Amino acid sequence: MASAPSVPPIDDRERGARQAHGLVRRFLIVFAFAWIVCTAITSAWALTTPLAAAPDEPAHIVKAASVARGQLVGPSTPKGNVVQVPSYIAWTNNQTCTAFTETVTADCVTQVPGDPTTLVDITTTAGLYNPLYYVLVGWPSLVFDDSTGIFAMRLMSALVCSFFLAVGFALIATWRHRALPVIAFLTAATPVTLFLAGTINPNGLEVTAMMAAVVGLLTITTRQSAAPLWLPLSALVVGGVFAANTRGLSPLWLAMAIAAALVLLPGRDLLALLKRRSVQVTIVLVALGTAAAAAWLLGSNSLAMAVDPNAPPPPYPHVGDAPIVGVAVILDLTFYYGAQMIGEFGWLDTPAPDAVFFIWPAVIGLLLLGAGVLLRGRRLVVAVLLMAAVVFVPALLQGVWVTSGGIIWQGRYTLPLFALMLLTIGALLAEHGSALGRSIQRRLVVILIAALGFAQFLSYIGALRRYSIGDTGGSWLAMITRPEWTPPGGMTLWLAVGVLTIGAACFGAARLALRARAEDELVTVR
């Protein structure tokens, strides 16, 4: 009897193809889970935040509704750009009664008088902003005839921002060493980031799209994944183009992200990467998207000191002072702005509970300490430069601006740079996590994710408490038993939603961070 033919061994190419296919499949599964969970969390913020109770939200609501009606800018006046929108949109300028007064509950918000669909002229200080974000979120105002349209616009913002959060998180799922990168990603997604994602403000899209682009860059330059090269390149293109076309400083943040990632590569590896056709196409697409952002900035003059170039300087502190004054003021307020990046909601009038400002900086400190102790060579240089950038770049930018515009900086403006720093440090520390030993690493991951999840929930219910009973030092129980204001559906419903969604996010993140597979080999990105 003839012997059966021997089965040829699977060659490296076939093994690599199977591995790449498996990683793409994992990416899609994690992406779907993350998009659903992130959308649920940011939607909870969207529906429990009172109307006009987010920074500059009325201006952005008016801008979004006007862009949806084909009015990209509108005539310029000293008070903003004039557009025509339904009265229920314009009325949001009169619904900011909770702003800057933490003891006032959200039941002060008044309803729209008369016919809410009547078109009226109104000004918006966001008139010169790039219209991309507003195209994405403004269209529900064409469908609804009352404030339901505003909440629908918030939900669209939550959906879009969550898409980019999911892309970044799912890319990390393809990495071999992902415990510390997952921690860094969760830390970069601060409570304020999720809050902004659920309101009408391009700041949320700027941060989340930047996170997707940065993870795409790091996936390529750190060689942590055997996924096909098109996967992180796609994240870089989509995230980079959307991030660049949100706010005035967005192209700068994207340029810094690209520079930091490229410095991580030795010259020979960088040249080899640049020779690849897919990389060249990516460079062209990102360059075109950034050029479009720059063209809008220059054409609209949106970085000018005022909406109307003939208007007097705005009444902000230190207008007319020397640049060094602006630098000194921002450096002196470094930790104040740091707190704003973590847990200052509303119009910067609703701080998170004190525990949040212990937990979040503690995790940030662990990551920064790890970078200083464990990293070497160019990796340490990049980490230190990014740490310095988070402190000094805002100060330098404010120094340029202070003479003509005064002190205008807010912590949320630094969020894209803050996320770049944390995500990069998390990626650079990735391989060092295994040195802790499996047992210690497991406990560390569980403790940190649980702590971050607890801080997210505290932030969420802290904002609910402030708007339901006011920040008067009253009992937390009063927000359930004697609320002066409740979000649609009642307080108990939204407390349950917060527990379930944040709990699901923590469970999924911990499972991903701790799960290791034999096929996760450290190979060059294909």
Image (spheres, rainbow, N blue to C red):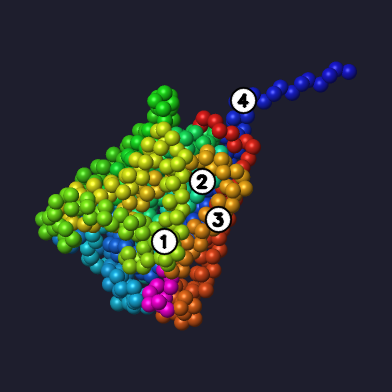
Which of the two residues, 495 or 446, is positioned nearer the viewer here?
446
- Residue at horizontal 56 percent and vertical 58 percent from the top: 504
Q: Earlier in the sequence, mark 3 or mark 4?
A: 4
Q: Residue furthest right?
A: 1
Q: Earlier in the sequence, mark 1 or mark 4?
A: 4
Q: CA distance from mark 4 to mark 2?
A: 29 Å
Q: Which circle marks residue 447 in the picture?
A: 3
- Residue segment shown in magenta: 463-474
Q: Quadrant of residue 66?
A: bottom left
Which of the two residues, 507 or 448, is positioned nearer the viewer here?
448
Query: Pointer 2: residues within 10 angstroms few (<14), some, or many (20+)?
Result: many
* Residue type marked 1: Phe
Q: CA distance from mark 1 to mark 2?
A: 21 Å
* Residue type marked 3: Ile
Q: Which circle marks residue 357 in the picture?
A: 1
Q: Is residue 174 visible?
A: no
Which of the two residues, 444 or 104, is positioned nearer the viewer here?
444
Q: Nearer the viewer, mark 4 or mark 2?
A: 2
